[in-house]
Image (tube, helix red, strand yellow):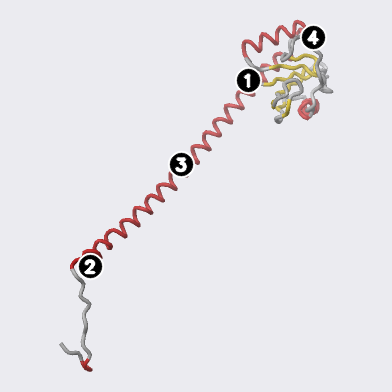
Amino acid sequence: MSMPGGAKRSRLRLSLRARLALLLLAVVVPLTAFTVLRRYHDYRNELAAAGQKTLELSRSLGIAIEKDIEGRIATLVVLAQANSLAESRLDRFRERVDSVIYEQLPGSHILLLRPDGQQVLNTRVPDGTPLPARVNLATIRRVMETGRPAVSEVFIGVTAKRPLVSIDVPVKRPDGFIPFILSLNPP
């Protein structure tokens, strides 16, 4: 067949094999692209779900820790009101503290501190052992200023020689004076 102007029309003829290969590519490439995009979308959704679960777990753990600390503070507040402590009978107070630790706070240690940080009683060591002053006084100052319980940052204990957190509660007299701070070092 002739074309006007004498040019011949050449037609690109593909073999059956080439046509089948193109047909296969026309099906496989979009399917592969769809699969990759779908997997990426699923990955993003799973990543978001994992992040959400981690956040929920963190919140739950925070609430559990807060409730545990509140319970320990309540125990210390009750101990701070002990008659044996008000009467300065430290031997009887030590017995009570040892009993509370055994029954309610296993592995913990309780200290009785003066406002200057000097330890008066420490259940970590046997009775009668010379006791050093606490080096970390920030929480004691906060308790003295506010008259309320406080939880410390992590610090290295003078007696324990390891990282500790203390829960400090004021020991108040009826007139509001705070002669001591009762401190708990959880395990």
Residue 14 x %, y %: 21, 72
| Cα–Cα gap, marks 4 and 2 | 97 Å
Q: Amino acid at mark 1?
A: Gly
Residue 79 x %, y %: 71, 13
**SS at badge 3:** helix
- Front-most of residues 133 and 2: 2
Q: Earlier in the sequence, mark 4 or mark 2?
A: 2
> Which is more foreground, mark 1 or mark 3?
3
> Which is more foreground, mark 4 or mark 2?
2
Residue 125 x %, y %: 74, 13
**Quadrant of the image containing the C terminus:** top right
Residue 155 appears in the figure: yes
**Quadrant of the image containing the N terminus:** bottom left
Q: Which mark is residue 71?
A: 1
> Which is more foreground, mark 1 or mark 2?
2
Where is mark 4, residue-wise?
Answer: 128
Q: Residues within 10 Å of mark 3 (few under 14, many from 20)?
A: few
Q: Amino acid at mark 4?
A: Gly
Residue 165 appears in the figure: no
| Cα–Cα gap, marks 1 and 2 | 78 Å
Q: Residues within 10 Å of mark 1 (few under 14, many from 20)?
A: few
Q: Amino acid at mark 3?
A: Ala
Residue 91 x %, y %: 77, 6
Where is mark 3, residue-wise?
Answer: 49
| Cα–Cα gap, marks 1 and 3 | 33 Å
Q: At x 75% / y 15%, what residue is drawn? A: 122
Where is mark 2, residue-wise?
Answer: 18
Asked if marks 1 and 2 touch (Cβ < 8 Å), the reply is no
Please state if 5 lies on the left or on the right of 172 as rendered. left
**SS at badge 1:** helix
